[in-house]
Image (cartoon, rainbow, N blue to C red):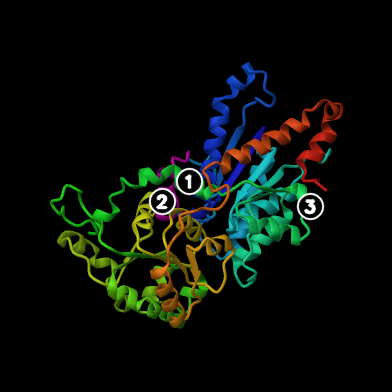
Amino acid sequence: MRILTVVGARPNFMKAAPIIRAINRHNSNVALFAAGGERCSERIEHTLVHTGQHYDELMSGSFFHDLNLPPPDIHLGVGPGSPVVQTAEIMTKFEPVLCDQRPDVVVVVGDVTSTLASALVACKTVFDPAGSKPLVAHVEAGLRSFDRSMLEEINRILTDHVSDLLLVSEPSGLKNLRSEGIPGEKIHYVGNTMIDSLLAFRQKAESSTILQELGFHSCNAGDGAGPRIRRYALLTLHRPANVDRRGAFLDILGGLEELAAECPIIFPAHPRTQNRIQQFDLDHGLGVNRSMIASLADSGTTASGIIVTPPLGYLDFLSLMMHAVMVITDSGGIQEETTCLGVPCVTVRENTERPITVEMGTNVLAGTSREGIQKAISQQRKQKISGSVPEKWDGQAAARIIDLLLRIRCDRELPELATNRTASRQSIFTGSFR
């Protein structure tokens, strides 16, 4: 079986890496399966395509190293541009790759531009006059914020409706897809591959030196317990609605003033966000800017305020997230990761496509007003985290996905289907699940 996986932006890498590891595990066990007489013991031929939507080292390259991802087999080199330009570039460059590779399955992950663009190409591509097509499998299907002003929401909806397999990460996805009329046989609750990555690399992240570099390891207290970690909060902001308008950005910073006066807030800033900080002349509105980080680390002290850093690699960021007293974010994936870690999270948005994080009690929606953010932070300071996690967030989601694809492959080889392999291929691998 041939599987082609598409990645393009940093959220994709954490979701795709476990799938690639599951494929490698399957291939390592092929000989054992064959010796035991198991069906579907063929190797999986895998191709990794990087669109280049995130194209620099900090937003892309370091994640391949941190997550032990192999170098991409094919790099489309799309680079910067508006969402429309990037969509068109990805579609134009991906089509010849797809026709050359002729995979049985195209795996797309998440809700970024690369996800929708590659899914559209795959669903429109026919390999031969017999109508052979790749099956499109969407990992993290069914999430809905019900806010169509968000580019990601459009990507999610359209990708789900052109995909053949909807691989759901939380229970709300099942409800959303069914309410939209998606046939039940297409929908599979497999769990969360982003959590697979977190659980796989959590221990390794403990060896990150980012806390020492930022000066948040205190001196040994002499009690034999080793260095202690000073209190800090963690902030991420990247959504255009939050950072592209000066007034909105200032409201959010205002909502963080009380927390920043109590403990430092580390702010690894997306390149777009860094540009807005400079454009809006907000550097002195932040208690500590990135030019002061080295002196803080050298002195062994940490001031109050907001410490702006460049984007961080996966392991460094995971280390910061694990030890933070609170995380303030507008990212969907971070809402999930903090739920798994049991770290209080305040989401600077009016809605979330991941309602399970709110239901579990780890996440509070703050809105974007100064007062709403202050209230949510105060609420989270008093919150007791239960420590429970959603069903199937157990590190085995990728294994379930590969098992599912292999079962579909097995079904195609059953005796009653083997009499007409062409028809079988079309019914199983064209998305005709109705």
Q: Are marks 2 and 3 in contact (CB under 8 Å)?
A: no
| Residue 74 on image: x %, y % | 55, 42
Amino acid type of disc 1?
Ser
Instruction: Look at mark 1 in the image and give the residue it sits on.
Output: 197
Image height check: is 368 above or below 135? Answer: below
| Residue 428 on image: x %, y % | 78, 39
| Residue 285 on image: x %, y % | 32, 79
CA–CA distance in space, label 1 to label 3: 30 Å
Image height check: is 432 above or below 32? Answer: below
Secondary structure, mark 1, is: helix
In this rendered view, identify the residue nearer to me: 374 or 308.
374
Image height check: is 168 above or below 281? Answer: above
Amino acid type of disc 3?
Pro
**Residue located 51% across and 50% down the image:** 194
**Residue located 28% across and 76% down the image:** 261
- Residue 157 falls inside the magenta stretch: no
**Circle 1 Cα neighbour tier, 10 Å, few/some/many (<14 / 14–19 / ≥20):** many
Find residue 66 and name its label: none
| Residue 129 on image: x %, y % | 83, 39
Apparent side of residue 315 relative to residue 358 in the rendered image (left or right):
left
Find residue 183 and name its label: 3
CA–CA distance in space, label 2 to label 1: 10 Å
Q: Are marks 1 and 3 in contact (CB under 8 Å)?
A: no
Instruction: Look at mark 2 in the image and give the residue it sits on.
Output: 314
Q: Are marks 2 and 1 in contact (CB under 8 Å)?
A: yes
Apparent side of residue 406 relative to residue 244 in the rendered image (left or right):
right
N-term-proximal mark, 2 vs 1: 1
What segment carries the magenta color? 57-70
User: Between tags 2 and 1, which lies in front?
Assistant: 1
